[in-house]
Image: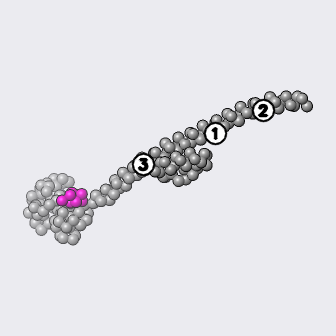
Amino acid sequence: MEALQDLLANLVPILQVLAILVGAYLVLLWAASVLWAYRDIRRRSDDVSVQVLAVSLVLLLPFAGLPLHLILRPPQTLAEKYERELEQEYLRRDIEEKYVCPECQRPVEPDFILCPHCQTALRRRCTSCERVVDLTWSVCPYCGADGAHAARQAPTVVAASYPALQRADDAMTR
Ligand SMILES: [Zn+2]
Ligand SMILES: [Zn+2]
């Protein structure tokens, strides 16, 4: 019986030390979670009130606040958001970068020789190889045929003073 009491008497201080260590570890863990939440929310929001809210949630609700923060935080970091916006901007430009008629600004295909809406001459067809070439080119780049010669042969399509095809964004800046 005395042996057991001795054992318990020795065990109590050991348990106390253990409890203190565990307590200190939990406090450190809580402090680390607050720090992590602070860093995490700063990567996800510029808004100071959102930052304060997220940090105080984790600070005031030790351990229970962290899962709440994970649920409520903005899904994307600011860097991801920026990257995504850039991507969408590029996509949008790709879609917009279509050819338009220089006269009526309506969309045309790059191989059209006439605008289907206003009949403006956009390009001409080479008389020897039949490929579509720019109005301003003096020779056909595909077969080397003389463009001036072609102009005489096909006066209805070719009119040297007509503007060549232009990009949609050139037209916008006018
Ligand atoms: Zn047109
Ligand atoms: Zn040709």
Which corner quadrant holds the C terminus? bottom left
Position of residue 19 measured from the top left corner of the image (x, y, whole percent): 71, 36
- Secondary structure at badge 2 equals helix
Q: Residue at x 42, y 46 (%)?
A: 79
Q: Residue at x 22, y 60 (%)?
A: 172
Cα–Cα span, label 2 and label 3? 51 Å
Q: Which mark is residue 46?
A: 3
Name the kind of residue labelled 2 in the image: Val
Magenta-tinted stretch: 168-174
Amino acid type, residue under disc 1 in the picture: Leu
Going from the N terminus, do you reach mark 1 or mark 2 first? 2
Q: Residues within 10 Å of mark 3 (few under 14, many from 20)?
A: few
Element type at mark 3:
loop
What whole-number distance in Å separates the C-alpha atoms at marks 1 and 2?
Answer: 21 Å
Question: Is 173 drawn above or below residue 114 in the view shown?
Answer: above
| Residue 166 falls in image quadrant | bottom left
Q: Which residue is mark 1?
A: 26
Q: Which residue is mark 2?
A: 12
Picture quadrant where residue 3 is located: top right
